[in-house]
Image: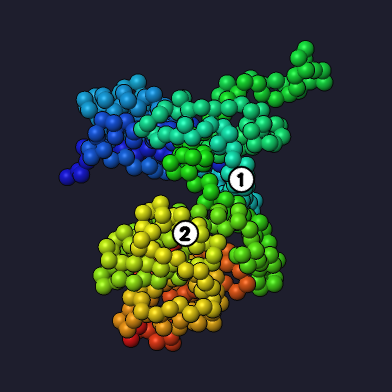
Amino acid sequence: MEPFRYHVFICDQKKAEGVPGCNASGSERVIDALRRELGARRLMDEVQVTVCGSLGVCERGPNMVVYPEGIWYSGLTPQDVPEIVEKHFQQGQVVERLVNRDAAALAAEIRSNRDKYLAALRAKDAAGALPDDLQEKIRGFQESRVILTAIELDVFSAVGSSAGYHSALRIPHSALPGARAADVAAKIGADARATEMLLNALVAIGLLTKQGEVVRPASRRQGPAGETAGTEGAIYQNTPVAARYFIEGAPDDARAALMHTVHLWQRWSTLSDCVRAGTSVTYEEAAERGDHWTRAFIAAMHRNAAERAPHVVRAVGTGGVERMLDVGGGSGAYSIAFATAGEKLRAELLDLPAVCKLAQGYIEKAGLSGRITTRTGDLRSDDLGSGYDLVFVSAICHMLDEQENLDLIERCRKALKPGGRLVIQDFILEPDKTAPKSAALFSLNMLVGTKHGASYSDPEYAVWMREAGFANVARVRLPGPSGLMIATRV
């Protein structure tokens, strides 16, 4: 028994540049068009789409196989998709012009391509060449830096304003505003030639598109208008994902938050020196980093916390919680989430003065000024108060060393009522500290950014909590990179 009327397998394998493959032939656009067409015709519950690796006929791509008939379609374009959906999936008629009917020829071509691929792998291995996936990881910083530079210079806003924001189901890409390289350079105050190179790289990455290029070859002689080598008339446009997240003022604008990642770049460039020294070689106290750093950091933390807060609130619950202390609460995203979930819950957020000022803006925007208050203080040394039902410590422990964490947890215990709970959210490592990968990498983020911070393991948190006088210590795993450690004051 089949759970769907049709099951579609469509190849999207990415191969080395210059090697024929479905992704290089535009399979991403075909997949996007197929999903949008199925959604528009309300066929998602009848047609299952599975993106897969190579189907073996790489030169014919993009390729798609439709079951239960086993029909092989090749050389697809986004323009072919509506016809396939209407005729094949709705009317049961195969689109013959796109079908490979010669099964023997298909099988022979697949075997030939497979043998060529295996021979190439053997030759590469014999030559001692790095595997492609390892090479991609080593050089991955290049694409990252291109995107971060574009964010830092606000290139995407210069290419097209937030009026061009759209989702795939709203405005067609052709209707988006665009700009020439020289215009973008003028807007961002950069060199025109270098800006064009950056824009072309963003096209290669898939965050911009480019249309209408006319190449002017280099010449020792200038033309009548003083022309030089380059392109003329090419228009760059934001792709849907760039328009959604990277344009200033768009509903899902993430640029302010991503500026924190831009700032991290400088720290990570010192990693070798930090490993030699055993600590950050560029460390500054938060108050010394300037308003631009603080705003970007809090914006990034708010964006991350707003996404994770529902999972945390569901796992912790608000039953019996009337007073909550949010230690180092940042933007207040978690206080907002807990107060929203618990009608009787009142939260107090403790953080540095500059952060509390920003948090008040987020709290006011959420309409919770009457139930969430802020208190300035230093979580590393201040008394935390008393009489709380819940003390929440999110993304704090990784900034501290072992003794500082034990001290913080002891002060959290004093702030709780008997039976009150301490909830720590952080990147929690497995006992051998090699997983999850996000937590292991984040530990290095703390090496380059703090004096003695790190990611810590489940057993380490459990020891600190028990030493501080907590019972019922438990780890709660959540979807995503972080988890919870929860304990009860006895």
From what the image shows, is residue 205 above or below residue 133?
Answer: above
Residue at the image position 39 percent from the left and 43 percent from the top: 52
Q: Amino acid at mark 2?
A: Ala
Residue at the disc numbered 2? 359
Question: On the picture, is 338 further left or further right than 430?
Answer: left
Crowdedness of circle 2 by 10 Å Cα count: few (<14), some, many (20+)?
Answer: many
Q: Amino acid at mark 1?
A: Glu
Image location (x, y in percent) of residue 326 = 42, 69
Q: Where the N terminus falls, by quadrant?
A: top left
From what the image shows, is residue 262 above or below residue 380?
Answer: above
Image location (x, y in percent) of residue 290 = 63, 58
> Gap in Å between the C-alphas at discs 1 and 2?
24 Å
Quarter-wise, where is residue 378 in the image? bottom right
- Taking the image as drawn, is residue 387 in sight? yes
Q: How many marks?
A: 2
Residue at the image position 63 percent from the left and 72 percent from the top: 451
Question: On the picture, is 299 further left or further right than 152?
Answer: left
Front residue of 102 and 312: 312
Q: Secondary structure at mark 2?
A: helix
Farthest left residue in view: 1
Q: Where the C terminus falls, by quadrant?
A: bottom left
Residue at the disc numbered 1? 152
Farthest right residue in view: 220
Front residue of 65 and 175: 175
Q: Nearer the viewer, mark 1 or mark 2?
A: 2
